[in-house]
Image (cartoon, helix red, strand yellow):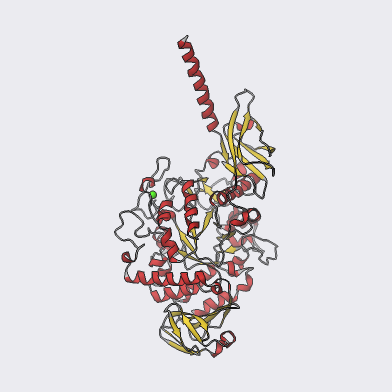
Amino acid sequence: MKNQFHSVLVLLITILVNSFLHAQEIKVEPAFWWIGMNNPELQLLVYAENIAESEVEIKYKGIELVKVNKVENPNYLFIDLKIQPDAKPGKFNIEFLKKNGKNDIVFYELKKRKKISEDYKGFDNSDVIYLIMPDRFSNGNPENDSHPDMLEKADRNNPDGRHGGDLQGIINHLDYISNLGVTAAWLTPFQENNRPKYSYHGYAISDFYKTDPRIGTNKDYVKFVEECHKRDLKVIMDVVLNHCDTTHWFIRDLPSQDWIHQFPEFTRSNFRTPVQLDPYASDFDKEKMLNGWFDRFMADLNHDNPFLLKYLIQNTIWWIESAGLNGIRLDTQPYSEKEHVATWAKSIFEEYPDFNIVGEAWLQKIAITAYWQKDANNVDGYNSNIPSVTDFPMHSAISQAFNENEGWAEGMARLYYILAQDFLYANPEMNLIFPDNHDLSRFYQNMQKDIRKYKMGLSFILTTRGIPMIYYGTEILMVGKEHAGHGYIRRDFPGGWPNDTINAFIPDGRTVIQNEAFDFLKNLLNWRKEKEVIQTGKLKQFVPENGIYVYFRYNENETVMIVLNNNDEERSFETGRYNEVIKDYSKGYEIISKSELNDISNISISAKSAMIIELYNK
Ligand code: CA
């Protein structure tokens, strides 16, 4: 009798464990959602072997099961739910009823929102963004450098390998970042990239809902955002819609053949993004641009598939809501079907009206860049719904202007001409402007390691229109040429690793010239942070003459005069030419040298330098 009882018990436990394990095999994404979102609709992707053979049942007050969608692959179901206003936060069962009676259950949670939509305040021209590549900034947890489930192990000697940087490392240095004077942090993608090699950059995502375990956990990411917010730093997430890694679980078992763009043989994009707006573009070129793959291991996602598009929209909203983000940087904006990208952006703003998104439109021509900005005056009527664009034409101008002798269109005239074409932009104040980024040669390198040019360039970036972005390490004069390989422009921040011999996070760890750069930038950034006139004031520029470029930022209360001298010698000049802005002002305070100017009718400026002068009368 005792033995029989024991057998029954074992059998019961086995059944329970089996059913539990079985239930665990059902993947549901998003894993949870919220009550009280502006959009009451939710579509769940359900993945399990032959799940499409099940009937779906949900009994929870306020949850309406609208439709269960089947696709080509029987391992998927897409469940449309409607969350009614009377639904309360809580957990409920999604039951999958099978013909054999062995039903499965998934527990699903609808959470209470932590904030209302309007609290998700986006970044704008009052901000300066600090760009960090998590693998390369600081290693706060050496235990997670390699992970048993992840193919690539850490190797700090390999410029293209994983170096062990992580979220904890960034959290450890948030005071450093905040003290520098920037107001927002943008991390390159932190989601799982499970590739055998070259996985550190983050742009080949293998799980959209999961933080790469070598960078941290989803909980760590939420903590990172909270720690940023404590220091008044906004957080921008890097989102990749165009492609994902071929190791992603849904690429290995496609929901339908049209989930990605497929070709009889590997077909690379032609990277000619102008075909999206060229009135004479051929269908052949368009097809190759939009549907060709970015790389062999980056499956090109097909946003024409409505389930995929909804999946990506919900994924972005899930991260914004989970972490409390302030903005998105959208990778490769012009590489996907543009109407769908516009739909994605619109869906985000319907949920978070005060949010912001910057699209990476890596284009050299102003007209073509302007096309991708929200409310652009496009003849084809296209509206991307994305408020900020990456100002690559300005980057190109800055890279050249300070290294050239003056000409009709060279030297300072490059800056003048770039801004003179702002009429093409719907909102140039929202352009992201940058001296370099993670894909470009480092700025100090471009300035031929001449700190005078470096200071001029940064003075310009931080006082002209737009939203400035500073790439980590710029403040300590990190160098690197893009054509030497991306590893060289994404070096580890010295002092970020426990055994580093140099620690550039502290003044004693920096060289004299590094401290000069750091102090210069810190002074300028902290000044800009308080200067509404620089953030949102009007801009007036004067035609550069003899290598001197003068422009003003002004509003009702304040006027700031910026002077750039691109000559290799000191210059003096009369300021009568600028009287329409200077008006009654007679004095000034120059913020780089922190010195008073008692008479601004004549200004002397050192060789290759900038002056930023707050005008006043006393
Ligand atoms: Ca680590």
Q: Locate residue 5, reporting x and y percent.
A: 48, 13
41 shown above or below 330: above
- The quadrant holding residue 29 is top right
Provide residue 587's location: percent of width, then percent of height. Answer: 50, 86
Q: Is residue 153 left or right of residue 30?
A: left
- Please give the count of numbered marks on the rendered protein: 0
Name the foreground residue: 193 vs 36: 36
Residue at 62%, 44% (x, y): give it: 258
> Which image quadrant is residue 105 in?
top right
Query: Which x, y percent locates residue 220?
Result: 46, 48
Residue at 45%, 58% in the rendered image? 132
**Residue furthest toward the top?**
1
Q: Position of residue 442 (x, y in %)?
A: 42, 66
In the rendered image, the residue lying farthest to the front is: 618
**Nearer to the camera, 378 or 569:** 569
The answer to whether residue 410 is seen in the rendering is no
Q: Is residue 374 visible?
A: yes
Front-most of residues 204 and 264? 204
Q: Residue furthest left?
A: 501
* Left or right of 388 on screen, residue 206: left
